[in-house]
Amino acid sequence: MNFEHTEDRRMLADTLDRFVAGQCPMETRNAIAYGSTGMSPALWGQFAELGAIGALFPEADGGFGGAGFDIAVVFEALGRGLVVEPFLGALMVGRALATAGTPAQKERIASLIDGSTVAALAHDEPGSHYELARVATQAVRNAQGWALSGAKAVVVQGGAAQLLLVSARTAGAVDSEDGISLFLVPADAPGVVRRGYGRIDGGGAADIAFEQVQLGADALLGAEGQGFATLELAVGWGVLALCAEALGAMEVAKKDTLEYLQTRKQFGVPIGSFQALQHRMADLLLEVEQARSAVINAAAAMDAERLVRERALSAAKFTIGRIGTLVSEESIQMHGGIGMTWELPLSHYAKRLVMIDHQLGDEDHHLARYMALGQHS
């Protein structure tokens, strides 16, 4: 396997790094991330002009990238800058549209790529515990199309989104893979009730209730009751993206900690000269490389058959969850009390790393899933 990025991907990474460093330094990022909307529409538009959203999609869908490694490059750069703009929603909703959409539905991908539409995946429900097939929200067919009822929890950027991709049950038991359908819902449709709030690691989320929301027949994405495979694939792209984002954040936490050990003095010498801290830092460097290998493995598996792909993704998410928490804890420990302060960027990286573990399935969930998938192979 080739571990070197192509020239195009290296240029994309450099461009994004320079843009984020210039346009979104930590003070600006925190003002956006912890502000009332949890994102900056102006910055989102600039990312679109830069081609950062287009890099998430293949040429057939109007983008210019779309491979696993393209996703990894973009999200690693976003992780290095702790960017909170709604890339994850654009990726997951856009990929679902590309996989299962009618020609008319696929036309909506263009508005995701140019930044004019903010999209969010509304799938997780209160008490679903990351189980992808556990969907209690219901859609009932009627003369006009569909009536949608239910509740979704912690929809990332759900308050800012104009387009929601909603999973709902049209048949089957509450945890059955069969009978799940996907619907495109305008966020301002009558009966959609959103309660937005800020996330602890920055950015916005929302709890969304659907109170007999009337949808046209063209709101259905893909075949009725056959939405699980599309959902799994879309979430798979999201898992890869989060793993790459975590890797970018880990790199910054690691670099900042190394610099601190080399400059902070105690007893007249840098604390990095103490053997105990050298050993801890060496262990950390090894762990981050292990995380990088897991992300590369997942990115390479995105075109493989389902079992190979899903096992690689769960292996990566488990690894990232474990190592992200370790990097957070060790970096703060080696910084001492200052590591906890709001003013030091490290505290924000640590929060994001811990919270990534809880998005789209934590390490316990993905370890169990990895083992379950192994029994099918």
Image (spheres, rainbow, N blue to C red):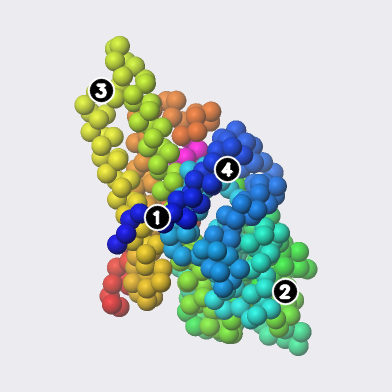
Q: Is residue 376 magenta?
A: no
Tell me the crowding category of disc 3: few under 14, some 14 to 19, or many 20 or more residues within 10 angstroms, Cα based: few
- Calculate the distance from the C-alpha at mark 3 to the C-alpha at mark 2: 65 Å
Numbered circle sitting on residue 273 = 3
Amino acid carrying label 2: it is Gln
Residue 330 at x, y percent in the picture: 34, 36
Amino acid carrying label 1: it is His
Which of pointers 4 and 2 indicates the residue nearer the eye? 4
Which of pointers 3 and 1 indicates the residue nearer the eye? 1
Sequence-wise, the earlier of marks 2 and 1 is 1
Identify the magenta region. 347-351
Q: Nearest the camera: 56 or 12? A: 12
Amino acid carrying label 3: it is Ser
The residue to which callout 1 is attached is: 5
The residue to which callout 2 is attached is: 212
- Calculate the distance from the C-alpha at mark 4 to the C-alpha at mark 1: 20 Å
Numbered circle sitting on residue 297 = none
The residue to which callout 4 is attached is: 19
